Image (cartoon, rainbow, N blue to C red):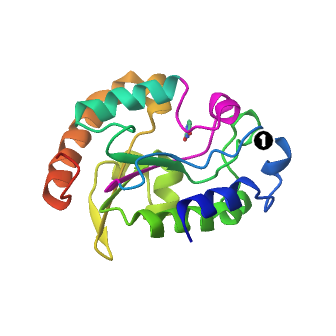
Amino acid sequence: MTWEELENQCSACHKCSLSDTRTNVVFGAGSRSAEVMLVGEGPGENEDRQGEPFVGRAGKLLDDMLAIIGLSRGKNVYICNIVKCRPPNNRDPLNMEQDACIDWLRAQFRLLRPKIIICLGRIAGGVILGGDYKITRDHGKLTERDGVVMTSIYHPAALLRDPGKRPETFADLKNIEAEIRRVCERTYD
Ligand code: URA
C-alpha cells in the first residue's frame, strides 16, 4: 500500500456517519518521511473546510509550539488525527467513530514508521497510550512500546482555553526535544 493509495481509500470512507456531514476528509499533513508523528483528536470547522489538520487558532499555536523545539510540519513532522472527519459541533468523537476510523491511523503508522508519537490531548492520549490514561497526570511522560517512544501533551485548544497550562507544556516540550535528539537520526539535520 502506498501513501497515495491509502489517502484515496480514506477519502472515500463511509465507515461511520461522520462521512454524512463532512466537507472534506482530513487525512493528514506534513512530511511522509518524518520520524515524529503527532496525533490530534479530530478535525474542527476550519480543518473540515480546508481538508488539512490543525489550520485554525489551535493549529497556529501548535505551529508555534513545534517551532520552540525545532519542528515544523513542512519539514520534520507528520500530523494526523484519531478521526479523519469532523464530529458535528466539535463534540468528542464517539467510541464507535474512533473504532471505525482507527485502521486508517494504523495504516499511516505502518507507512511512516515513526520513532516517536506525540499525542495531542486527552482523546489521542487515551486511545494511543491506553490503560487508565489521564492527561492531567500523564502529560509529558515518556513510554516505549515495540521500539516506539510515546508521549502526550495538552491539546493546543486546551492551552488557548487555559494559558495556565502553558509553563508545564513548555517543560514537556523541552523534555520531548531531548528525547527526539536521543532516538531520532534525521529530525534535526
Ligand atoms: N483539533 C484536533 O484535534 N485536530 C485538528 O486537526 C484540529 C483541531
Q: Is residue 42 magenta?
A: yes
Q: Which residue is mark 1?
A: 22
Q: Who's the residue at 18% across and 54% down the image?
A: 179
**Corner quadrant of residue 12:** bottom right
Instruction: Answer with left or right where residue 146 lies relative to residue 127.
Output: left
How many discs mark residues in the rendered view? 1
- What span is in magenta? 34-56
Quick one: 71 or 141, which is closer to the camera? 71
**Corner quadrant of residue 170:** top left
Up the image or down, 32 lies above or below 2; here it is above
Quick one: 26 or 82, which is closer to the camera? 26
Q: Which image quarter has ligand 1?
A: top right
Q: Position of residue 138 (x, y in %)?
A: 35, 53
SS category of the residue bearing label 1: loop
Query: Which amino acid type is shown beneath numbered disc 1?
Result: Arg
Up the image or down, 63 lies above or below 186; here it is above
Could one spot residue 132 in this view of the protein?
Answer: no
Q: Position of residue 20 (x, y in %)?
A: 86, 47
Up the image or down, 136 lies above or below 55; here it is below
Up the image or down, 181 lies above or below 163; here it is below
**Corner quadrant of residue 150:** bottom left
Q: Who's the residue at 38% across and 66% down the image?
A: 113
Category of crowding for the residue at label 1, using alpha-carbon neighbours closer than 10 angstroms: few (below 14), some (14–19), many (at least 20): some
Instruction: Answer with left or right where residue 11 lies relative to residue 1.
Output: right
Instruction: Answer with left or right where residue 2 lies relative to residue 169.
Output: right
Q: Who's the residue at 83% across and 41% down the image?
A: 21
Label 1 lies in ligand 1 vicinity (Cβ under 8 Å): no
Q: Who's the residue at 35% across and 24% down the image?
A: 164
